[in-house]
Amino acid sequence: MTSICENEVFMVSTHAATRMAQRGIRRAILDLVVLHGTPAKAQNDCEEYILSEQAARFLVNTGYDPQTITAATKVRAIVDPCGTIVTCYHKRNGRARPSSRTSHLRDTRHI
């Protein structure tokens, strides 16, 4: 599956297409995240693309729909080293995963 956006072509894996459908992420939003987002290192030599608030303000000022841009700031895309989008998801509030620290209350005995 390919997407053509602003003279660039990138592949979307079957897994990513499934996740887009399950999570209600539109192609236009994913395109914005990958084309205008900032890459960060992810697992397995992949990159995670995030549309920053600064990039979002710039896009709104250049005429993009503010609602679409707001939605794009809440989406993350994982791209493999070959340039294929392998998955996408909505940003979570707070910690991405539970803390590995154990609570001090677990060792407390209740009488």
Image (cartoon, grey):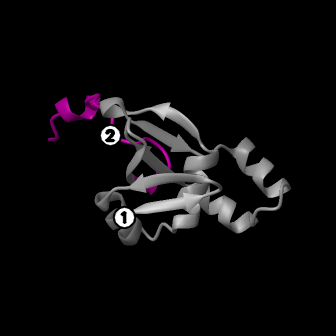
Nearer the observer, 83 or 86: 83
Dot 1, crowdedness within 10 Å: few (<14), some or many (≥20)?
Answer: some
> Which corner quadrant holds the C terminus?
top left
- Mark sitting on residue 98: 2
Q: Secondary structure at mark 2?
A: loop
Q: Is residue 78 left or right of residue 31?
A: left
Verify CB contact (< 8 Å) between mark 1 and mark 2: no
Asked whether residue 43 appears in the rendered view, the answer is: yes
Amino acid marked by disc 2:
Pro
Residue 45 belongs to magenta span: no
The residue at the point 26 percent across, 34 percent down is 105
Q: Is residue 56 left or right of residue 93?
A: right
Q: Is residue 39 left or right of residue 47?
A: right
- Mark sitting on residue 17: 1
- Mark sitting on residue 72: none
Asked whether residue 91 appears in the rendered view, the answer is: no
x and y, in percent, of residue 54 in the image: 74, 42
Amino acid marked by disc 1:
Ala
Specify the principal SS of the magenta part.
Answer: loop
The residue at the point 32 percent across, 40 percent down is 98
The residue at the point 67 percent across, 60 percent down is 70
Q: Which residues are magenta?
A: 88-111
Nearer the camera: disc 1 or disc 2: 1
x and y, in percent, of residue 16 in the image: 35, 58
